[in-house]
Image (tube, rainbow, N blue to C red):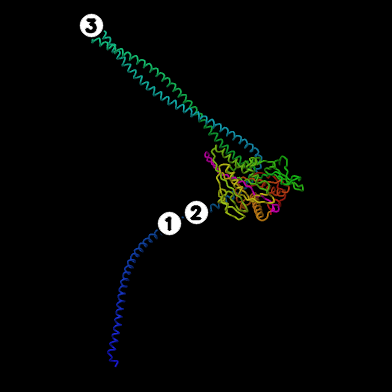
Amino acid sequence: MKKFDHKGNLELVSELNARLKVCIKWFQKRDESHVEEEGKLQIALDASEKKCTETEAEIKNKEETFSATISELRQDNACLQERLAKEESEKLDAIACHRKENEARIALEALQASLTKDLEKAQQDILAANQRAASVDDMYKRLQEYNLSLQQYNSKLHAELEVARESLKRVEKEKSTIVENHSTLRGRYSSLQDQLNLARTAQDEALNQKDTLANEVKCLRGELQQYKESSGESCAKLEYHMEKTKSLEETCSSQREQICLLEHQLAAANEKLKMSDLSSIETRTEFEKQKRTVRELQERLAETENQLVEGEKLRKKLHNTILELKGNIRVFCRVRPVLPDDGAGSEPPVISYPTSTEALGRGIDVIQSAGQKYPFTFDKVFNHDASQQEVFVEISQLVQSALDGYKVCIFAYGQTGSGKTYTMMGRPEAPEQKGLIPRSLEQIFQTSQSLMAQGWKYKMQASMLEIYNETIRDLLSTNKSSSTENGAPGKQYTIKHDANGNTHVTDLTIVDVCRIEEISSLLRQAAQSRSVGKTQMNEQSSRSHFVFTLRISGVNEGTEQQVQGVLNLIDLAGSERLSRSGATGDRLKETQAINRSLSCLSDVIFSLAKKEDHVPFRNSKLTYLLQPCLGGDSKTLMFVNISPDPSSVGESLCSLRFAARVNACEIGIPRRQMLAQIPARPADSRLSYG
């Protein structure tokens, strides 16, 4: 029955048909969406193809650019290959030069050996040169007197030249005035000559007219005699001609008077012209005479200036020879006066001075409590009565060497309270108590000013530093952070030496100075910044090495000479044993650093004296800073300062023994025989205070 259920089948078919229609609509919608999507994809494809075409064109352009770059790089590579080949050839040349230098070095070593033999021979010759040193001193004094007389003669010639120039100017003014008057008179003479010619012409015409009229008068008188009974018209004509003749005669007489006057004026003008010519000749003669005088004075002045230049060269040479004979390292000793706080009381003095001729002014004896005497001899000994001026006179020649272009170092050594700072600085506010530093600077500025007349121009640069606990501090720095505070290091300074032997400290303040007042201001500023501390030896003890440096550059425009000098003035820190100073804490570290640096200084001096291959300059900042001043043609002077206090006799002996060892050293150019025997206590002569 179900098989023939058409109604049910029809409903099923209808339902299937309806579902089929729904599916067909769905497929139609999907087909439409596919068509839209296909259109969008076609548009995107077209855009992608266009973009691809543009990208291909851009890639082609970049390929062309890269090809050009590659060609350039290939060219650069070829150039680099050529440079590499050239550098390799230069390297081979350098290797050959190095080989030649090694051969030259071997030859130089052989030459050095021969020079060493010559040096030994020269040392023997120096002994004979010492005997000539006195005569050289006398010659130097005579040259100084001759130099002074030349300067006076030069100033006299300058004065005479100024007078001659003034008279020459006055003569030139008179000459110009006379020339103007001469030209005026010539113009007036020519005008008078023209007037005279015109007057003579007029006179000639008047005379001719007069002769004509006289002839006419004669004719008229004849006619008058012939025609006495002429008409009234003829009488009137006669009277007219008579009046005309009379007026012409008056005109002729006036012109004759004018001609006489003009002749007198012309004669006077000729006289004036003649006088003017004579005056001009005399003026020209006087001018030529003054010109010859000026030329002679200029020649004499040039000759005198040449003599001054030659005399200055000879003075520098003899001055340096004298200082070298005296010694490139010299030692002076100074004993400070007894102070109320020394507590000498009734105790006998511990310092005495020998009175023998050989040791007078150069010897000093130290007497211990047991009565034992220790004699010492130095280049110069200043007792407690010596003034600051007397001390400075002995070092003024060294200061002059700095102005002559040498490196000069003067330093004060000794225990705390022995007068080092007073010797170096003194009391600048009191003229009689100024120390070596202000007096040296005054001499340098005064001498440089006097040398300006000889064509010298100088440039001065000053710097001041201290070495505190092996750390450099710039005493002229306005930046407080650059200094050390409470032992903590601030800004670091590095010491460097260039190929010319000059010393430079990086970032150190260097000030150009032109006057002594500027230096005084800088010294006051440095004194306020310096490190001091209290010890058992002194209430205000310098706990650092103070180094004042003045760089001097001089140029002579006339002779084209140049000099480069350096003046180092150093106030060393107090040297004393730890047990003596009573230092603890920071003071203990300071004392240890001071003694260590002073011990390094002694090691350097003794290594130089022994001509050792290695000199330990770098062991301390002080010795490394002073390296160019210790050797060669540099000049070094050490002041050993001594206290007369009986309680300081041990420190005094230690300082004197060290100074005696320095005094016996031969550094740089050999100078002389040893002036003093070193006391026989080598164990105590070392700088060991710990």
* Percent coordinates x, y for residue 221 in the rendering: 27, 8
Disc 3 to disc 1: CB gap under 8 Å:
no
Magenta segment boundaries in residue numbering: 553-582
Nearer-N-terminus badge (2/1) = 1
Instruction: Tell which tag, 3 or 2, sits nearer the viewer.
Output: 3
Query: What's the amino acid at mark 1?
Result: Cys
Instruction: Give the structural element (helix, strand or loop) at label 1.
Output: helix
Residue type (three-letter) at the residue carrying disc 2: Asp
Between 556 and 68, the residue placed more toward the observer is: 556
CA distance for labels 3 and 1: 139 Å
Q: Amino acid at mark 3?
A: Glu
> Residue 62 lies in what quarter of the image?
bottom left
Image location (x, y in percent) of residue 315: 59, 38
Judging by the rendered image, the residue that carries numbered circle 2 is 93
Q: Tell me residue 91's x, y (percent).
A: 49, 55
User: Which label's residue is closer to the chain start, 3 or 2?
Assistant: 2
The numbered disc on residue 622 is none
Q: Which residue is mark 3?
A: 229
Specify the quadrant of the image occupied by residue 194: top left
Decide if residue 633 is in sight here. no
N-terminal label among 3 and 1: 1
Query: Where the C terminus falls, by quadrant?
Result: bottom right
Q: Nearer the viewer, mark 2 or mark 1?
A: 1
Q: Nearer the viewer, residue 134 or 432?
A: 432
Return the x and y of residue 562 as percentages of the image width and height: 54, 42
| Number of residues whose C-alpha sits closer than 10 Å to that of mark 3, classed few (under 14), some (14–19) or many (20 or more) | few
Whether residue 556 is in magenta: the answer is yes
The N terminus appears in which quarter of the rendering? bottom left
| Residue at disc 2, secondary structure | helix
Residue 195 visible in rendering? yes
**Label 1, on which residue?**
79
